[in-house]
Image (cartoon, rainbow, N blue to C red):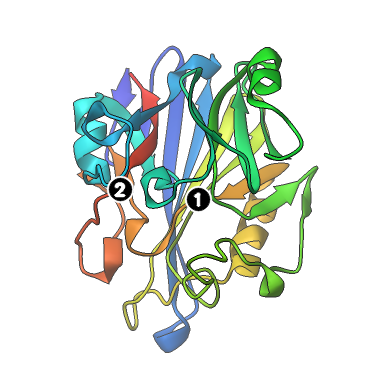
Amino acid sequence: MEQDDWNYSSADTSIHIEKVETGSGEDKITYFVADVQLTQASLLQSAFAKNAFGRNITENTSTIADANNAILAINGDYYGFRSDGVIIRNGTIYRDEPVRDALALLSDGTMRSYNEEQVSSSELLAMGVTQTYSFGPTLVADGEITDDFDKVVIDTNFGNRSIQGSNPRTGIGMIAPNHYVFVVVDGRKDNYSKGMTLTEFAQVFKELGATEAYNLDGGGSSTMYFMGRVVNNPQGRQQERGVSDILYIAQ
């Protein structure tokens, strides 16, 4: 096994993290790309805050990651913020309230977006789905950017204030089976990073070679953890926000 602040390699896992900076001054954007290659899909797992499913249960991404001996982790979809969506984690159905376009991770090392109202949870399990994330939107499908994100509304019950404009972002993409990219964009800090629009975020995944990509919870939640430290700058002030869940690479 080999590791340093930006790399990790073992017999079954390879992780390389890169800090990317574009623009300058008010237009500067800083983001982090973790290139993840696994020999088996079961190394990509999810975990709940305090190891419990439910509303209003939160912990920092780093705390959940530490508790699960994660090598690398990002925040998930903050399922506890909502009462709807299809939530399957590590092969178990926790919530079955279909409403939006969601993400499915499968046991063959692939990922795909799907419409919760068109595919049942039992069908998902039969397909080999191990994890679902209910946030969105889908950024890339079949190698192409999916939509005009200027019109997207994720949560009509809460409005879509936080989804538009330049914001901190978290997302996951797949380059090939068992080859993923986790991307976390910082924001809300002048002359460091203003964040990204959804269109810019989707473009990053496409340029990285992702054939599929999906937007997870962003804003103050956006956090990347690696080998015992938080890599990015949550909320623009090195301060994590508690979340419901993480997506992580197991040791």
The residue at the point 32 percent across, 63 percent down is 220
Return the residue at label 1: 216
Q: Is residue 12 above or below residue 204?
A: above
- Marks 1 and 2: CB-CB under 8 Å? no
Front one among 229 and 153: 153
Front one among 184 and 59: 59
User: Nearer the N terminus, badge 1 or badge 2?
Assistant: 1
Residue 187 bears which disc, if any?
Answer: none
The residue at the point 42 percent across, 44 percent down is 79
**Which element carries disc 1, helix, strand or loop?**
loop
Quarter location, residue 63 = top left
Residue 61 percent location from the top left of the image? 27, 43
Residue 129 percent location from the top left of the image? 61, 21
Q: Which quarter shows the C terminus?
A: top left
- Gap in angstroms between the C-alphas marked 1 and 2: 12 Å
Quarter location, residue 74 = top left
Return the residue at label 2: 243
Residue 89 percent location from the top left of the image? 46, 25
Left or right relative to 107: residue 171 = left
Left or right relative to 139: residue 241 = left
